[in-house]
Image: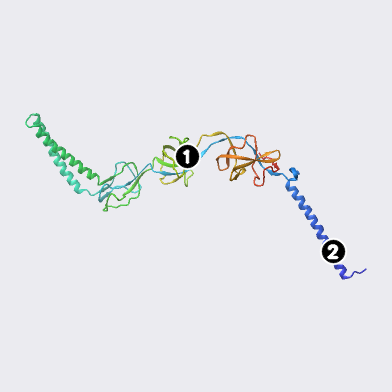
Amino acid sequence: MKFKPSVILLILVLGYFAYSIANRIWFEDMRAERRAQELGQSGSRGAGGRAAIPVDYMIVTYETLEDMVVSTGTLIAGEQVDLRSEGSGRITQINFTEGSRVRAGQLLVKMNDRELQAQYDRARHRQRLAEERERRSNVLLEREAISLEEYEIVLTELNSLRAETDLIRAQIERTEIRAPFDGVVGLRSVSVGEFITSQNIVARIVSNDPIRLDFSVPERFFDVVKINSRVQFRVSGSDTLYTATVFAIEPHIDLDTRTILMRAIAPNPDGRLFPGASARVHLSMTPTDNAIMVPAESLLSEAEGHKGFVYKNGRAEMRDLVIGTRTPRETQIISGLQVGDTLIVSGIMQIRPNSPVRLNPRMD
């Protein structure tokens, strides 16, 4: 039996449509089965037929919290002075090497003092003559060869010459620049033969051992940090942990930052710490033994405060939480949780109050 071409074409079209419909029905059945497996292979569902959301959890317990204040500080020299001359003059000597260590009282710079030296020599000669005259007059006074008034005139002249000598000596000292303390001299900015005044900075002298550390802490720690409290710090570019001791506290609170400025001192015998370096300061508080600490990702931050979810009878119960100290990974809960609560720590963005939830098996 032969079929017409038109009939054969119709049969092929009908067969194609039948195959497409059967294939689509099979595909939908497979996708529905896979979705059911993803929602819970055990068939766990909440009231009303909604699938329970699988979540991770933790049992709330007490922990020891070592509270720590972290602040930024600045290292400053134990002593630091810009060397200047007290008067004016031309430099004749520079007796230090840049970057060298000097002793207190060491002569660093000398200015021209030839005229003052001449005046000083003349004053010294006149003083010696006056001293001899006073000695002879004293002998004559003891023998009553001269009157007391005559002796006092000689003595007054001697004292006047001594004062003149001291004055010239003080003027000579003003032509010298000496180290005020033991330290390291920095780069000089003058040369021999240069005329300088008191406005010129010759060099800077710094004492770095011990070195000081300035830092600030929030005002709420005013009663916690005391004189002799120990702090630890690190400087940029180094992993070495240094220890300093608080020796001074500013007696007022900064109105702009609501912080208190403190100053600590640290040994620096090897000179590794330099003034001006920034420091990361760590100040340990008194440990708290009954702190409730939860993972930071378990909290919801909203305009009215912080919230979290607790597992209760298969559902998520929302709690209002008051937080305290924060660490990089955990947050202290002041109120809102109790020891023994089952806190949900994952999937909180998908959970709504009273949502059905299913606890995942714990791996620990």
Residue at x-position 28% and y-position 46%: 177
Q: Amino acid at mark 2?
A: Leu
> Residue farthest to the right?
1
Q: Is residue 316 visible?
A: yes
Residue 311: quarter of image: top right
The residue at the point 75 percent across, 47 percent down is 37
Q: Is 10 positioned to the left or the right of 210 in the image? A: right
The front one of 344 and 66 is 344
Asked if the residue at tag 1 contacts the one at tag 2, i.e. Cβ–Cβ closer than 8 Å, the answer is: no
Q: Amino acid at mark 1?
A: Glu
Name the residue: 83% across, 60% down: 18
Question: Residue at (17%, 44%) from the top-left corner?
Answer: 121
Label 2's element?
Answer: helix
312 left or right, relative to 240: right
Residue sitting at the far left: 145
Residue 173 in which image quadrant: top left
User: Counting other residues with Cα less than 10 Å from the Cα at mark 2, is it few (<14), some (14-19), or many (20 or more)?
Assistant: few
What is the x, y in percent for residue 80? 35, 44
Between tags 2 and 1, which lies in front? 1
Toward the front, the furthest residue is 304
Of 13 and 133, which appears nearest the observer? 13
Relative to the observer, which residue lies in front, 193 or 48? 48
Residue 204's spot in the image, x, y percent? Answer: 34, 47
Query: Looking at the picture, how far across and down is residue 31, in whole percent?
Result: 76, 53
Q: Which residue is mark 2?
A: 14
What is the secondary structure assignment of the residue under circle 1?
Answer: helix
Measured Cα–Cα span from mark 2 to mark 1: 85 Å
Q: Is residue 41 visible?
A: no
Quadrant that contains the C terminus: top right
Task: Identify the disc placed on residue 219.
Answer: 1
